């Protein structure tokens, strides 16, 4: 069922292109899947359309993982039709993370950290994940959907209690940290506005600024790290990011390896 909070949000948004069309749902399977199908089938769903649900019954995360999405969270997907070529698409996950981190700071004074490539952490625990689905043909363009899942007005205990969630130790919520709830509509508005700010930087070719801002929020650079990608495990020291967000690791033999995928953690035993 689509609910009519759209007008409220749209009335308050200060934007040029993102969030001019919004669809609110009480409960749907996944805002990401809805956005993808809207982008494919509905000619009215154009660049900047935002899909928000109060609850998702089949939210999904990266690598096909389930994303538990109870009421109280911020579950949102944004349809983008970038004018830039496919090489910059990888930076969309970084601008999503920057938009969320900046919004949390502005609304709550909490400083988040970034975990490569697209997690947002508070006190070392994941509070938000970004999912980017791409339907892009080289430089011919296409559609990208940026999904944002922010654990806000529920506790991790509630996730435990749902009996379906296994990774609670590494997860947190804004309610756990703040001990009170936030105004979700305000947070949604802030995130869309800041996403647009970073998106326009990206369109303007200011990728260096995006990478530097993201790096400032990360604690891994200069540290010994372990990168796991399936059965592949890499040990080294996090050196930096390349212009498109790939992680650069200095290996034990001094060579530099570019990492495109994987789970990074700081390692104390190398
Ligand atoms: C991750 O694995 O860290 C990414 C999680 C992304 C979850 C969000 S919630 C809104 C949107 N709809 C989905 O089904 N997934 C994304």
Image (spheres, rainbow, N blue to C red):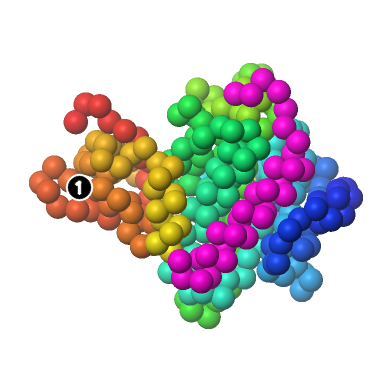
Q: Residues within 10 Å of mark 1 (few under 14, many from 20)?
A: some
Residue at horizontal 40%, vertical 62%?
208
Which of the 4 image quadrants contains residue 194?
A: bottom right
Residue at horizontal 53%, vertical 48%?
97
Q: Quadrant of the C terminus?
A: top left
Q: In the image, 197: left or right of 119? A: right
Q: What stretch is highlighted in magenta?
A: 177-206
Q: Does the magenta stretch include residue 36?
A: no
Q: In the image, 30: left or right of 143? A: right
Where residue 169 sits: x, y (%)?
50, 22
Instruction: Please state which of residues 87 and 216 is positioned toward the viewer in this rendering.
Output: 216
Q: In the image, 268: left or right of 84? A: left
Instruction: Please state which of residues 196 and 129 is positioned toward the viewer in this rendering.
Output: 196
Indicate whether 82 appears above or below 195: below
Indicate whether 188 appears above or below 138: above
Where residue 165 sits: x, y (%)?
59, 27
Residue at horizontal 52%, vertical 65%?
201
Q: Which residue lies furthest to the left in this view?
A: 253
Which residue has dot 1 on it?
250
| Residue 237 can be seen in this image | yes
User: Which secondary structure type mostly characterizes the magenta part of the structure?
Assistant: helix
């Amino acid at each position: 069922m689509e609910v009519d909070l759209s007008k409220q949000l749209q009335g308050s948004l200060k934007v040029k292109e993102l969030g001019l069309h919004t669809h609110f749902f009480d409960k749907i399977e996944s805002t990401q899947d809805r956005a993808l199908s809207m982008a494919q089938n509905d000619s009215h769903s154009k660049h900047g359309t935002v899909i928000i649900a109060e609850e998702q019954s089949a939210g999904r995360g990266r690598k096909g993982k389930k994303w538990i999405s109870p009421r109280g969270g911020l579950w949102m997907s944004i349809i983008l039709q970038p004018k830039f070529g496919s090489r910059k698409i990888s930076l969309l996950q970084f601008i999503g993370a920057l938009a969320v981190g900046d919004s949390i700071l502005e609304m709550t004074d909490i400083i988040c950290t970034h975990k490569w490539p697209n997690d947002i952490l508070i006190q070392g625990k994941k509070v938000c994940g970004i999912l980017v689905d791409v339907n892009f043909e080289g430089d011919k363009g296409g559609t990208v959907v940026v999904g944002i899942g922010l654990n806000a007005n529920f506790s991790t205990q509630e996730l435990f209690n749902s009996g379906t969630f296994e990774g609670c130790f590494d997860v947190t919520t804004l309610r756990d940290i703040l001990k009170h709830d936030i105004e979700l509509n305000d947070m949604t508005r802030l995130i869309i506005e800041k996403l647009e700010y970073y998106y326009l930087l990206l369109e303007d070719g200011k990728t260096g600024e995006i990478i530097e801002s993201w790096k400032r929020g990360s604690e891994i650079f200069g540290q010994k790290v372990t990168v796991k990608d399936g059965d592949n495990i890499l040990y080294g020291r996090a050196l930096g990011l390349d212009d498109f967000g790939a992680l650069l690791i200095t290996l034990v033999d001094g060579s530099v390896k570019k990492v495109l995928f994987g789970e990074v953690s700081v390692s104390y035993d190398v």
